[in-house]
Amino acid sequence: MSTTLERQTAGALPFAAYKGLSQEELTARIQAVREKMGPRLLILGHHYQRDEVIELSDLQGDSYRLSALAAENKDCRAIIFCGVHFMAETADILANRPERVKERRGERIPVVLPDMKAGCSMADMAAIDQVENCWNQLGQVIDLSEVIPVTYVNSAASLKAFCGRHGGTVCTSANADVALQWALSRGRRVLFFPDQHLGRNTALRMGIPLEEMPVWDPQAEELGGQTKEAIQKSRVILWKGYCSVHQIFLPSHVDYYREHYPGIRILVHPECMREVVEKADVVGSTGKIIRAVEEAPPGTKWAIGTELHLVNRLKKKHPEQEIYFLAPVVCMCSTMFRIDLPHLCWAAENLAAGTPVNVIRVDDATAADALVALERMLQLKG
Ligand code: 13P
Ligand code: SF4
């Protein structure tokens, strides 16, 4: 485990006291902390969060924007990250990088995740020992100096550190194409983890054929379940990981909307499977999805394939457009959903009281290597 979790500081207010409080009381108390702490407290909210949490966040964004915001902010002295674990780790690495800590005369910023159970099932599909094992096995059949590892930001800090150590980078769904182009300009092949769909959809757009994208299964006994020839022919080696939310969208859902709603535009996240992405009109990160709707003329019809809270928020904000959720079943990110007002209030009041809880702290060695890969990513965007 690359992080140390400072769950409870001695004297911290217990969570149990927050459970039965009304939404009005919780909102007022969180507002009171925001007023008391002013710009010293930064509450960041990922677009998949509940509406009541988004309303109390200072800044909202997709994974890329939130990383950039954590890297840029010079005023804040504490961050509450309303998102999932890997996002809080990334914020800790960027907000507490050595030059920033020096500017603050040694002061570290606590990055708080209101509920420690807010993880990401996709990030859990690639563990560092599995990636190290894959790397070692690859080294037996191909020259590792020609392989550039790229990790999707939805991954533990230890995987980002691995990429930092091996000349690789991090990407988000907003810049996967730039990151893959960068990697393929430096090496003959890319090892891409943990999301096979983002890797495949991006590489296909760059003209790399499917036959050159074997999928590495970390559970397989040998060579990720691939033949030596398949690995030697590869340009992009994909990891067998996926998002349990986005895999729910199917090509038949796209067909249904096309048939019943002539002229409808299909807008999906690149974590959806290839067969869905190929049938879509627009593919992009949550930030791009929001911009596409904001820029569309009134009357535009959309069926959107991404997390339910974001789609419902877009529906509310854009009554001048017709917006549908692409799947017939409810599919939301249950771990993002764990961040609720009781947890946010508990986290905020403990911060204000000087007894922070659920501080995400990446150990220094992991953070230093991961920072190398994250800085490469942030430079790529520019
Ligand atoms: P974004 O990069 O679009 O923020 O996506 C994050 C995520 O977890 C999507 O499942
Ligand atoms: Fe992870 Fe999928 Fe949830 Fe994003 S939507 S945080 S990839 S489980």
Image (cartoon, rainbow, N blue to C red):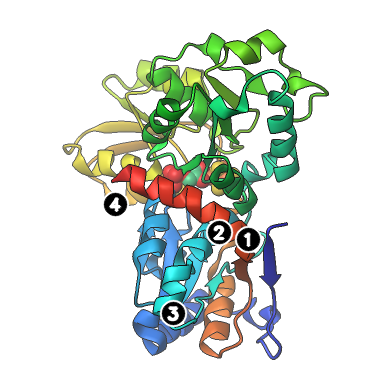
Mark 1 residue element: helix
Place of residue 6 in the rendered image (x, y in percent of width and height, measured from the top left): 68, 74
Q: Do the residues labelled 2 and 1 touch (CB within 8 Å)?
A: yes
Up/down of 40 relative to 169, above or below: below
Numbered label tally: 4
Q: Does the residue tagged 1 have its C-beta within 8 Å of any atom of ligand 2?
A: no
Three-letter code, disc 3: Arg
Look at the image and tell me whether residue 268 can be seen: no
120 or 93, which lies in front? 93
Q: Do the residues labelled 1 and 3 touch (CB within 8 Å)?
A: no
Report, in whole angstroms, how far the alpha carbon at label 2 lies from the one at label 1.
Answer: 5 Å
Residue mark closest to the camera, 2 vs 3: 2
Report, in whole angstroms, how far the alpha carbon at label 4 lies from the one at label 1.
Answer: 44 Å
In the shown orientation, is residue 161 left or right of residue 124?
Answer: left
Mark number, residue 317: 4
- The answer to which image quadrant residue 102 occupies is bottom left
- Residue shown at 36% from the left, 61% from the top: 69
In the shown orientation, is residue 51 left or right of residue 165?
Answer: left
Mark number, residue 368: 2
Most distant residue in the left direction:
297
Q: Do the residues labelled 4 and 1 touch (CB within 8 Å)?
A: no
Up/down of 179 relative to 217, above or below: below
Report, in whole angstroms, how far the alpha carbon at label 2 lies from the one at label 3.
Answer: 21 Å
Residue mark closest to the camera, 4 vs 3: 3
Residue that badge 1 annotates = 365
Sequence order check, earlier mark of 4 and 1:
4
